[in-house]
Amino acid sequence: MRPIIFSKMDFSHSSLFGYIEDLQELTIIERPVRRSLKTPEEIERLTVDEELSDIERALFLLSSGQDIQGTSVVANLPVLMRQNPAETLRRVLPKIREVLHVAGVEMQLTAAVSFLTVLQEESVSIHTYSHSFLHIILQNLEHRDAGVSNAWLETLLAVIEALPKETIRHEILNPLVSKAQLSQTLQSRLVSCKIMGKVANKFEAHIIKREVLPLVKSLCQDVEYEVRTCMCRQLEHVARGIGTDLTKTVVLPELVELARDEGSSVRLAAFETLVNLLDMFDADDRSQTVLPLVKSFCEKSFKADESIIVSLSFHLGKLCNGLYGIFTPEQHLRFLEFYKKLSTLGLQQENGHNDNQLHLQTLEQEKKYISVRKNCAYNFPAMIVFVDPKNFHLELYSIFFCLCHDPEVSVRYTMAISFFEVLDALVGHLPEILELMTNGGEKNGSESKLLSIPDLIPALTTAEQRAATSLKWRTHEKLLQKYACLPHIISSDQIYYRFIQRMLTIVLTNNVLPVQKAAARTLCVYLRYNRKQEQRHEVIQKLIEQLGQGKSYWNRLRFLDTCEFIMELFSKSFFCKYFFLPVLELTHDPVANVRMKLCCLLPKVKSTLKIPTDKHLLQQLELCIRKLLCQEKDKDVLTIVKRTVLELDRMEISVDAFQKRFYENDLLDQEKERQEHLLEMEQLEKEKQKNEGRSANINDKMFEKKRRDSKTSSVLAKSINLSISGSSSGTSAGKEEKKSKLVRSQSFSTQVLHPKYSNIDKCPNKSSATGYTSSIPGMGKSCMLSFSDDSFRTHSAGNSGNAVFPSSCSRNLFNSANQKNNGNKEGQSRKMSVKNRKSNS
């Protein structure tokens, strides 16, 4: 629109008409605004009295309202039926039936859906429904709009499933005789075909033969190809209803005739129905009737009739396996070659690669060829069965390679799905695929791992790295979850050196929370099945130091997630031994989010305790809770703490002995503990064998040394005796040292992992209400460890004179006592030697 400049007004003829045009444009712009406003009369007509009941309001809107209001009433029909079914059936439904005669398409579609909803919700009995609703459905079944007619037909087909036989016979089947005549409309005859297929399964075979089959034959010979096509597709349902005998004598001849029909859509429907009914034909019918038809279809698909090639490629796998028993070797080879030809249709290939040279073809042909190759990928597993898996490399490997490298993504995606559900489809079944690969294609539980697939581990690591660098984090998450199967595929050492550090790195550095959690859980699975104590200790140490004590609060949050997985996968004793105290340390975390998450985790932490074994850990937990209640300043954290305290108070702690209410959980935990113990014993046995080998070597060397020393002169007999005594003492000392090493290696269940928590395993099993006592040899006093405060402090023990020392004090006292005892023994030995010398002199 040109701007109107009033400062220089020109009233010439041309300018005046220009101004008029501008004004007309302004009026055109304003018209929609005026039309959108409602007049007072319209507003009054649309206003409904709020005091009306739901039934009265529905009747008012159906009688005097607009179409949109009537449609809302029809959509609300299921609600009215639930609230007041009697009044709705008596007053509202007759009004809806009246309105539907002149209703538009939207109200008709809404009514079809509402009637179906009432049936599915079973608001009324099926007898009442058929009496009130069925006639309305049948009246609107032949609506002039095809979409409306199909909607009512879908509702009717659903109703037929629930109706009794007599109602179907009188209300639907009997009127169908007249509706299927040539004198009726095309839409009426199409509806009759679909109803025939539905009612065929509702009656006995003799009733279908007498009342249904004559109509079926008539519709199969209809003058309109649409009717013949529709009826041909319903022949499968009819055949299932009448059985194999009548199918052979009645349905099969009709299919053979329809397969030679002049209409391509009719021939296609006949072919698909034949394939779906292969299991109902005997060997003679397959070899003498079905096979010649199939061969004719295959020949025409490339020569004169390309309309069925897409359907043929889709059903080829089912067809080949259905006719497998009657194929001659020549026919078997011919169908295999036909499949190979379809698999590369539309491509010029060299060594399985696309050279970017497509046939000169129309866009429609190109889409058709892509669909054919996609269907070939879909049927690839069936073709493997057809050629026998032993012949896969010879017969199908080249086609497998071509389909995997097809230029179309949809073909490659279907290929991935076909041999086990592109990357997302393959990852979902990665455990099954890896198991079959490592076992040579047989699920025989073989112990030999990676004997024939040396490149498996590099391929797995490369796949994970590519997923990590892509933008598809869900694929990366899924892949990490599936990598939890690796302990059943490869050895513990291979996982330790190639995957554990990578999982830990992902937990520490990745920015996507679901990916971090997936890596953390898989890492815990690897730890669960690790067979070497040193490696397990190292992983636990890294989890505590790099996550639990990490500088980033994000890492500390992930540590709590990891502890949840530990509690899920490991036994209670394992968690209490290695992770209980590191978790409690986070009550002092400076970040409120960490403390908040910890408080939410505390009920699970408490559930890992067993009384009386873990009584000291329970005291530490209660101490941490008291500190949080007294010292927490963050309001949100304090709220969660109070809620957690109530939950903890309601919890019951399991005891060492089995209880009925915890029986299943105790059995599961006992099994986990047993498996962990077996892994430890396996490692200890290996170390024991190794140590025995070393001790044997040392004994051989000592024996050789004694043999050489025995050849020395008799003059040095005294020195020899001294040397022998010294060597024997050295030998005993060496044995004691080896025994101590062996004892340390066997103390997996009591070994100290982190120096910070070294005092846990030194706590005695028996305790009193105030603390834990342990006697100190060589002293008349006892040392008592107290857990009544946040640190171990020294207390006086009253008149008894007993002192209470921290654990470090007890260690010093032990050392000092040992030194004094050793000093006394040395002094006594010196005195004895002096006395001997004096007596000799």
Image (tube, rainbow, N blue to C red):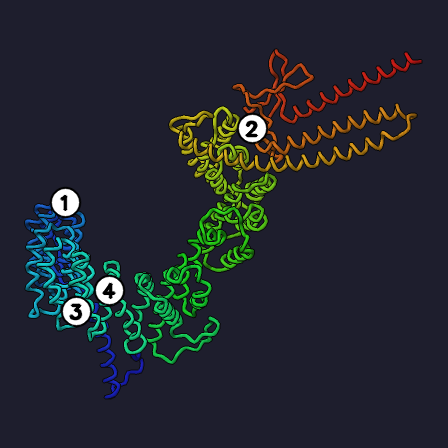
Residue under label 3 = 228
Element under disc 3: helix
Q: Earlier in the sequence, mark 4 or mark 2?
A: 4
In this rendered view, identify the residue nearer to me: 104 or 378: 378
- The dot on residue 83 is 1
Task: State the mark number for residue 140.
Answer: none
Q: Residue placed at 18% from the left, 59% from the top?
A: 239
- Is tag 3's residue or tag 4's residue first in the polypeptide sequence? 3
Q: Quadrant of the N terminus?
A: bottom left
* Distance CA(mark 4)–CA(mark 1): 50 Å
**Marks 2 and 3, how far apart at CA:** 89 Å
- Amino acid at pointer 3: Arg
Q: Is residue 480 visible?
A: yes
Helix, strand or loop at label 1? It is helix
- Specify few, some or many for label 4: CA neighbours under 10 Å numbering under 14, 14-19, or 20 or more: many
CA separation, marks 3 and 1?
Answer: 46 Å
